[in-house]
């Protein structure tokens, strides 16, 4: 984008799209990026987004598609009771995905997107009692604001939804599903994705440090606190003209490596 401004790029990716269509494009992009960065799990796990408007509807992937195959026009629309409102490919949706994602969208209208992964590093850290250790700069982004939810089996029991949202709390955007995987959420698809990208990297580093079996440098708690605040500040200023700067960079990457997401 040598001579292209950020706003020009936004117009190219979202040509006159109403907000409801932008959310579809963003959600499909997040699926492609999760696959591109090797965070997918075959056809499993989900990313969901709240449909803008008054209705309590959310978008999720058609069951059975690889994340890199997903197209914006083929996403499934569901309501919070699990009724499928629109299913362009007639493929349905995964009931376990419905349980977890409907819980979050029903309880936290501030969250427009919920992203769940099963990666080796994420599942490994979710299986430890310590969770995220504050042992490097990247990890300090998660010094606060991380919730945990005890494993109850594959999430098919709708009664689990209440416990899950109680564990998440009213403000947190990170949820470690114990012995299972990771969840990040955001006020936009871009925020949820960038949080997951960073969280996944933190889990990988933590496992590498622990595998080294070397003594670990500790970081003073006052430095942990101030660095966490610095990350919060950077996250706020990354929003330019209503767009998440880091997210736009990821969309430019997709234009090159996987442009079918927006079809
Ligand atoms: Zn899962």
Image: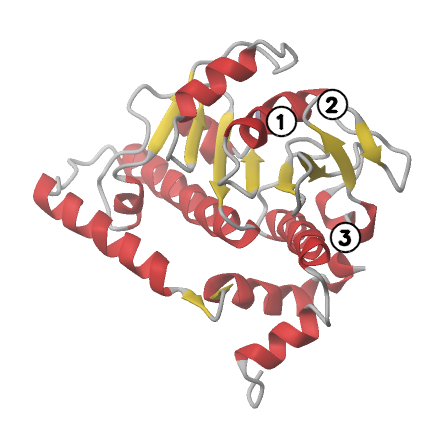
Q: Quadrant of residue 21?
A: bottom right
Question: Which callout, 1 or 2, points at the residue further toward the start of the chain?
Answer: 2
**On screen, 123 above or below 47?**
above
Label 3 sits on residue: 72
Q: Residue at x 62, y 27 (%)?
A: 102
Which residue in the protein does label 1 denote? 102
| Residue nearest the viewer, comparing 78 with 125 | 78
Q: Residue furthest front?
A: 54
Q: CA distance from mark 1 to mark 2?
A: 8 Å
SS under mark 3? helix
Location of residue 47 by image quarter: top right
Tell me what residue is drawn at x 40 percent, y 20 percent: 167
Q: Is residue 166 above or below residue 218?
A: above
Q: Nearer the viewer, mark 3 or mark 2?
A: 2
**Residue 238, above or below 175:** below
- Tell me residue 185's x, y (percent): 49, 40
Quadrant of the displayed image that contains ligand 1? top right
Counting residues from the start of the chain, the first of labels 3 and 2 encountered is 3
Q: Is residue 239 left or right of residue 66?
A: left
Model colouring? secondary structure
Q: Earlier in the sequence, mark 1 or mark 3?
A: 3
Q: Is residue 139 left or right of residue 121?
A: left
Residue 82 bears which disc, if any? Answer: 2
Rounded to the nearest angstrom, the CA distance separating label 1 from label 3 is: 20 Å
Q: Identify the residue at horizontal 56%, vertical 34% (top origin).
A: 116
User: Residue 147 location in percent, x, y?
Assistant: 37, 27
Q: Does the CB distance between marks 3 and 2 fall below 8 Å?
A: no
Mark 1, mark 3: which one is toward the viewer? Answer: 1
């Amino acid at each position: 984008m040598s001579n292209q401004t950020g706003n020009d790029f936004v117009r190219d990716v979202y040509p006159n799209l109403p907000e409801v269509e932008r959310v579809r494009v963003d959600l499909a992009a997040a699926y492609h990026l999760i696959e591109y960065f090797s965070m997918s799990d075959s056809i499993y796990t989900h990313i969901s987004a709240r449909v803008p408007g008054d209705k309590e509807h959310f978008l999720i992937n058609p069951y059975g598609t690889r994340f890199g195959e997903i197209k914006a026009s083929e996403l499934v629309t569901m309501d919070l009771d699990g009724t499928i409102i629109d299913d362009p490919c007639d493929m349905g949706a995964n009931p376990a995905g419905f349980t977890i994602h409907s819980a979050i969208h029903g309880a936290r209208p501030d969250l427009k997107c919920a992203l769940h992964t099963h990666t080796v590093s994420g599942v490994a850290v979710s299986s430890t009692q310590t969770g995220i250790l504050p042992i490097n700069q990247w990890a300090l982004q998660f010094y606060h604001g991380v919730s945990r939810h005890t494993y109850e089996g594959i999430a098919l029991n709708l009664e689990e939804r209440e416990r899950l949202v109680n564990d998440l709390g009213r403000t947190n955007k990170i949820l470690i599903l114990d012995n299972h995987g990771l969840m990040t959420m955001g006020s936009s698809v871009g925020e949820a994705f960038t949080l997951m990208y960073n969280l996944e990297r933190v889990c990988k580093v933590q496992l590498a440090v622990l595998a080294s079996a070397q003594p670990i440098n500790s970081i003073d708690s006052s430095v942990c606190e101030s660095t966490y605040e610095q990350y919060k500040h950077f996250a706020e200023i990354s929003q330019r003209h209503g767009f998440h700067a880091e997210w736009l960079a990821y969309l430019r990457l997709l234009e090159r490596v996987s442009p079918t997401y927006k079809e």
